[in-house]
Amino acid sequence: MEAMLKLTNINKTFNPGTINENKVLNNVNLTLEPGDFVTVIGGNGAGKSTILNVVAGVFPVDTGTIILDGEDITKLPEHKRAKHIGRVFQDPMQGTAADMEIQENLAMANRRGKNRGLAWGITKEEKEKFYKLVKELGLGLEDRLSDKVGLLSGGQRQALTLLMSTIQKPDILLLDEHTAALDPKTAKIVLDITNHIIENQNLTAIMVTHNMRDAIKIGNRLVMMSEGNIIYDVKGEEKSKLKVDDLLKKFEEYSGDEFSNDRILLQR
Amino acid sequence: MQSILLALQGALSQGLLWAIMALGVYITFRLLNTSDLSVDGSFATGGSVAAILISNNVNPILAILAAIFSGAIAGFITGFLHTKCKIPAILSGILTQLSLYSINLRIMGRSNIPLLKYDNIFKSFSESTGINTMMSTIIIGAIIIVLVIGIMYWFFGTEIGSALRATGSNENMVRSLGVDTNYAKIIGFMIANALVAFSGALVTQSQGYADVKMGTGAIVIGLASIIIGEVLVRKGTNFALKLSAIVFGSIVYRSAVAVVLQLGLNTDDLKLFTAVLVAIALTAPVIVESSDRNKMVKSEEEQ
Ligand SMILES: Nc1ncnc2c1ncn2[C@@H]1O[C@H](COP(=O)(O)OP(=O)(O)O)[C@@H](O)[C@H]1O
Ligand SMILES: [Mg+2]
C-alpha cells in the first residue's frame, strides 16, 4: 500500500545563527499508511505542533521532503496545500471566522482547495447539506445556521471546525490539542465527534494531545516525541494494551533528566 | 431659514457623493479590518483624472470610468506594498498617499483645474430634464448610491467576496481553507480605492474644479460617516442595511457641517470640528456599553 504521508529527514531550526537558535525537529522520519490515526504525545516544546505546521506548510523546512498521497508538497505554499489538508487548532477562535454565519463558514470550507469565482458564496443545496451535517453533531446548531459563529461556545466552535476541516475529505487531518482548551465534559463530546468523523470517512489523521489516556484509547498508532525526536512509535494491539505508566516509563527511559518536568505536563 | 434649507439640500447632495468614498473606506476599515490611509490621495486622484480628461473635452462619464480605474491602481499599490513587501498597512497607505500627491500634480500639470466651462453629468442631466442642478445632483447621487450598494451586496456575497470578508475576520483560517489571502487583500484595497476615486470624480464634477488638496482629511470624513451610521443604526445585521447606514452617516455628517457653518463656525476650523466629531463618535460605543453594563448591574441588584 502506498503511504499517505511520508516525512523524510525533516530538520527545522528556528532563528538559525542567532542566540535564540532552536533546533526543533531533528531528522524526523514518519510514514502514515492510509487510514492511520496517529496520536502524538510529548512534553511542551517537543516539536509536536511544529510537525503539524511543517506538514501544513505554515513555514518551510530546512531539509527533508514531505510527500502527501504521492505528491511532493515540500515547496508548495500553505494555501495551495490546503486542498489536501484539514486542520483544527487548540484555540477555538482560530478555526472559524467569528464575524460570519455558521453556514457562511461551512460554505467557505466546502470550497477548500477549489477555485473561487463570482458565483454566489452559498447555494441552496449547500444549505440543505449543512443542515444535515450540523444536525449529526447533535449540538442543536442546525437551527442556528445563520447565527454568527462568534455567538458559539468554545466546544461548539471546535465541533464546527472539525466539520469544516472534513467537509471536503482531506488527505490528512491535523488536530493540534483541539480539546485542550475545553472543559472535560465538552472535551469528551468533541473527542467523540472526532472519532466518529474519522471512522466514518476512514480518514488519515494525526492528533496531538496532552492526555495520555486519550492517546492510548484513540487511534491505531501512538507516537511519542521529545526534543525534536520521535522516541517511541507503537501500533495496533501493542498500542491498545499500553498503560499510562508504560508511557511514563518510556518517557523516563529516553529523556532522562527532563522527565520530572514533563511528567507534570503530561496528564494521566 | 431659507438659507438653512438650502444648506441642508447641499448637505444631502454632498453627503450622497461623499458616501461613495465612505463605502470604500468601509471595505478596508470594517471588512478587511485594517487601515488604509491611501484614501486622501486616491480621492484626489479620482478628481485629478476626471478633471484633466474633462478639460480635454472627454465625455464626463468616460472621465469617471478612468478615475475609477486609477483608484483601483492606487489600491493595488497599497495592497502590494502591504502584502508582498510586508510593510504595515498604515505605512503602506501613507506611502501611497504621499506619492499620489506628486502623481496628482503630474496628472493635472498644476495644482488646480477649474471646470465651470465644461460639461458634467449633473449639468447635462439638469439641462435635459429642466430640474435644477442641486436636485439633479441629489437624484443622480441617489441612483449611483443604490447601484453601488447593490453591486457591493452582490460582490460580498460571492465566493470571492465571502473569502475577502473572511480574510478580515480570520486570516489564518482563510489561508488554511486554500485562499491566497494576499490576493484577497489586494482585491479589497483595489475595490475600496476605486470607490474612493469614483467619489472624487463625482465631487470634482459637482463642485466644478479639482484641487490637489481636495482629498485632505477624506479618510477621517469616511470614518466619521461609518461611525455615525453605526451609532444611529444599531439594529440589524443585514449587509445592505449596514451600507445604507453609512450613506445616512455621510448625510448626517454633511448636515452637521452645514449647520455649524451656518451658526458661524469658521471654515478654517472645519477639520478640527471633524476630528472632534469622530473622536466623540468613536467614544460613543464605549459610553453606550458602560451605560448598558450599569443598567445590567442595576437590574441585577433589583432582583
Ligand atoms: N514560529 C516559531 N518561531 C520560533 N520558534 C518557534 C516557532 N514555533 C515554535 N517554536 C519553538 O519551537 C519549539 C517547539 O514548539 P512546538 O512544536 O510548538 O512544541 P509543542 O510540542 O509543545 O507543540 C518551542 O521551543 C517553540 O518555542
Ligand atoms: Mg503545541
Image: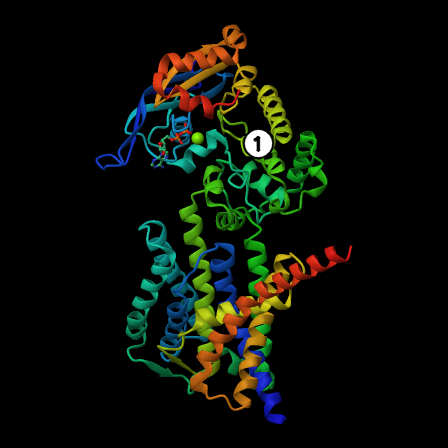
> Residue sitting at 62 percent across and 93 percent down?
B2
Colour scheme used in the picture?
Answer: rainbow
The image shows residue B72 at horizontal and vertical percentages of: 41, 61
Q: Residues within 10 Å of mark 1 (few under 14, many from 20)?
A: many
Q: In the rendered view of the protein, which quadrant contains the C terminus of chain B?
A: bottom right
Q: In the rendered view, tell whether residue B24 sits above or below residue B85.
A: below
Return the residue nearer the eye: A41 or B132: A41
Q: Position of residue B243 (x, y in %)?
A: 59, 63
Residue drawn at the location 51% of the way across and 83% of the way down = B123
Give left or right: position of B124 versus A24.
right
* Quarter holding residue A110: top right
Q: Nearer the viewer, residue B281 or B108?
A: B281
Q: Which residue is identified by label 1?
A: A162
Query: Residue drawn at (28%, 71%), measured in percent from left and top?
Result: B102
Q: In the displayed structure, would residue A81 be above or below residue B41?
A: above
| Residue B146 appears in the figure | no
Q: Amino acid at mark 1?
A: Leu
- The quarter of the picture where the N terminus of chain B appears is bottom right
- Judged from the image, the secondary structure of the residue bearing numbered disc 1 is helix
Q: Nearer the viewer, residue B109 or B277?
A: B277
- Please tell me in which quarter of the rendered image ligand 1 is found: top left
Seen in the picture, residue B103 relative to B297 is either above or below; the reply is below
Q: Residue furthest bottom?
A: B2
- Give the left or right position of residue B174, taking residue B287 as reference: left
Chain letter of mark 1 equals A
| A252 relative to A53, above or below | above
Residue occupying image coordinates x 31% and y 73%: B107
Q: CB at mark 1 closer than 8 A to ligand 2?
A: no
Q: Position of residue B18 (x, y in %)?
A: 51, 73
